[in-house]
Amino acid sequence: MNNQISTQWNPGFPVTNTGFLRISASQVGVDEKKACNDFISLKSRPAAKIGEGYMQLRYPPFESFPLGIVRDALLSVINNEKVIHEFEDIEQLSIDSITEAITKNRGKVEKSHKLWAIDALTGYLKAWEKAREEDLLKQIDFTDLEVIQAFDSSGDSYTEWFAWGIYLTSHDGKIREFRALKFSKAGLTILNPVRAGVIARILADGVPHSEPSWSSPRDPIYNVLQPPQLIRIRELGALDASQAVVLSESVENARKLFEEKSLPVVTERIKGGNQNVGPNCRSCRANTMCPTLPNRPGLLGITAYAAWPKAYSPSKFHTYRRCPRQYFLQDELGLRAKQESSNSAQQRGLLVHAWLEEAHKRVKTCAIHDLPSKSKLGQIAENLGWNKDEAEIALPYLAQHQITCPINSSSKVATEISIEVLDTDADVTISTRPDILFKNGVDLVWRETKTVSSIKDLEQDIYFNIYPQLPLAIRLMVEDCLPKNVLEEFGEFKNKRVELELISPEECKTYIWNCEDEQVQLFAWSQLAEQVDTWASDTLFTPSTNPPCNWCKVSQWCEFANAEQVKADIGGLQVDLKTGEIIENSGIPLISNDDRVAKALGLSASLAEVSENDDDIPF
Ligand code: SF4
Ligand code: SF4
Ligand SMILES: [Zn+2]
């Protein structure tokens, strides 16, 4: 079987050498919405040389891929044949093997990462036990298989296919199984068909190989393995000990799946030629030459490089403001938690945003009859699959919005937009998602919408401090960072402004900043620089003075957890650390020239924000 992919490569950046292809199942199998063909095409060519002028990639001083240590420890457990027989003490085995894997790791491993990895390995081994019990009932007994890859070569082209996981074979050699590491929910999410096809092909035709440096081609070692008859993919969840076989096919069907579902998509992606900005831009070698990622030196206004290449977003800043340690564990170390709990402010915020997005996509003014009522949910809530309780939570806010909805049938509307920019002076990628961009007449508007329990009577500019989205939005508008396709679709405009729509159950107020106003520009820039500066240079991530430990997803692995604290005291102003609400009876009036008010409301806004979570495994 030969499935050689064309060597044709047309990325949007200059290339001086292309070399061989090494194609990763997860990389080529990312969802359509997230896939950047140029990124995938570059990553799939380990020997490729790109044009001059790229920024050397720098790395943090600590290990930042949480499952890496778990897999190293797992492989050593398997190699020591401990997995093949029943485990005696899973917890102890996890502690010992993670400790050993850490001593062999080149990067520094944080204490929290170690604790997390022990829990993750324990969960994984428990899932492994369940899998074995299930298999033994069917008289299947697995043994370790070397790491394998599939190879295709013809003429001057050479392709390797690989997948990051654990490979097993049945004792009689007839069944091969790939065990994918997941954070949780094994078998409960849809298996990407492109990725599945590549893994299936590797299982069907894969062979062991040599291990030269990453940038050199590997040599296949043929004729040492007996060909299998059946291939299987099994997912194992480390945090919830879940496990499930998600694909089981004959070898012929595995090859067919690869040819039909994977090859056409992979061929397209590997060719490159278009870009899709997203989280990959941070680690993309071509990010300073990319025709789609705007490079804006000095955009953030900070004077030095970040401690390592960092990714800034208002959501990350909110996490950082809640507790820098929490930010470090969640966003820099990437530790994932099983339980995602949310407070009432987060829930209502998510619901109201979802409804408004769905409503505004229609390019129609929100009307009373669109709102959910006692007798019916309404088309919009139905589209969102809401139940009555959800509609009841959102209704008071939606009813207030509806009175002043800015959209009409001659508006141009863009929702679900991602904006990604690189500040090359700071080595920071910036990403954000406007709640809505629209054009009414000659006005281009970026609007952020926030739900609050009550709207305080504050000076307008204090909102820059409370909602870091605002100064960033103004900078991005001023620096022309909106996606080209959106601007093309919108056509000409004369004025640019950023708006904040605050909605409470009693009223809806909109604050406006004109992006052409120099004073607005300068104030936004200085506020943004102030917000980003500490975050970008932080290498210690000391817990905040008011950490919301009780409701922190990563508290079980944090050495500073203090579960006793339930409210923050900011110079006499108190904030409930669970709900994010200001405790009104604290007797201090909310006046906006009081620094404490800005701090308390800022913390309150951050506690109401939902953190981003990207569960993609990067291999
Ligand atoms: S910088 Fe971003 S959009 Fe450009 S090629 Fe790299 S990953 Fe793709
Ligand atoms: S447990 Fe507390 S100190 Fe630790 S990261 Fe969470 S909020 Fe911060
Ligand atoms: Zn509306």
Image (spheres, rainbow, N blue to C red):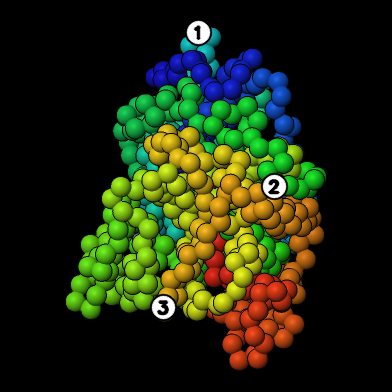
Q: Residue at point 61% right, 79% down?
A: 577
Closer mark to the observer between disc 2 and disc 1: 2
Location of residue 112 in the rendering, given as x and y in whole percent from the top left corner: 71, 63
Sequence order check, earlier mark of 2 and 1: 1
Tell me: residue 215, above or below residue 371. Answer: above
Location of residue 214 in the rendering, given as x and y in whole percent from the top left corner: 66, 28
* Kind of element beneath mark 3: loop
Q: Which residue is mark 3?
A: 505
Q: Which residue is mark 2?
A: 300
Sequence order check, earlier mark of 1 and 3: 1
Q: Residue at point 28% right, 50% down?
A: 409
Image disc number at residue 155: 1
* Kind of element beneath mark 2: loop
Residue type highlighted by circle 3: Pro
Q: CA distance from mark 3 to mark 2?
A: 35 Å
Q: Residue at point 71% right, 64% down?
A: 324
Tell me: residue 521, above or below residue 252. Answer: below
Location of residue 155 in the rendering, given as x and y in whole percent from the top left corner: 50, 8
Residue type highlighted by circle 2: Leu
